[in-house]
Image (cartoon, helix red, strand yellow):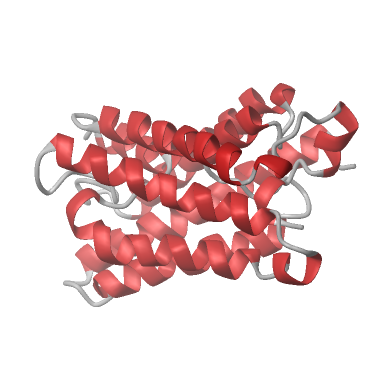
Amino acid sequence: MQSPVKKYTAEFISTFIMVFCGTGAIIINQESGGVVTHMGIAITFGLIVMSMIYAFGSISGAHMNPAVSIALAISGKHPLRDLVPFVLSQVTGAITASCTLHALFPANATLGSTLPAGSAFQSFILEFFLTFFLMLVIFTVGRKRKREGSLAGIVIGGVVGLEALFAGPICGASMNPARSLAPAIISGHTEHLWVYLSATVFGAIFAVLVCKFLLAETFIPQTHADVEKSRIGAYEN
């Protein structure tokens, strides 16, 4: 069993690296005149999520995402007492990453913020379903046998990259409140922040409800010891 400090530190570090590399790719693409490309940005997000799952999954689960932590806590697959510290660690890591990027690229106006290309409602619906799809995969991969579960990082990172690839140009494909909160606060572009804070959490919670119906046998009430054994939730088996 990992100590709480190690778990929270792992969440801080993994979220920092995810936001630094992911939004950093957006910033560098803008600064370099499009050299990274949209496909490169999507691949960056997918690869960094995959890498962090394998690097920190055995310590904290490498959620890197408050919506994921909330959904896992509601489902009983993550200790409720760890929820607030996890979210605080994730948000702090994300903000630290955006502050670092701002220091490196002070002239960049948005710092990789997620901003709707169309209406706010359009992006809300997209973010809701993107996070719903991601959480469905997290839950279903998490119930696989050990050999299949070892592919969790590849599968989850692949879904993140896929969703960023096709939906990124319209809504930014955040799927993550911390990823959107940090650059919005540091850059001052908070006008549509509510979309990314609410739609992602609602989408993740909806996935819990659907999975409770589809995968009822894996959502039975757990003891405290059971939760500790499975606290990394869907990211490692």
**Is 119 displayed left or right of 101 in the figure?**
left
Residue at the image point whose x is 68% and y is 64% from the top:
54
Q: Residue lying furthest bottom in this view? A: 35
Quarter of the picture containing the N terminus is top right
Residue 32 horizontal/vertical position (percent): 22, 71
Asked which quadrant contains residue 87, the reply is top right
Residue 231 horizontal/vertical position (percent): 76, 41
Residue closer to the observer: 22 or 129: 129
**Is 60 displayed left or right of 126 in the figure?**
right
**Camera sees residue 45:** no
Please determine whether, in this image, residue 208 is positioned above or below residue 136: above
> How many numbered discs, if any?
0
Asked which quadrant contains residue 153, the reply is bottom right
Residue 144 horizontal/vertical position (percent): 71, 61
**Camera sees residue 198:** yes
Please determine whether, in this image, residue 38 is positioned above or below residue 227: below
Residue closer to the observer: 169 or 191: 169
Residue at the image point whose x is 71% and y is 37% from the top:
77
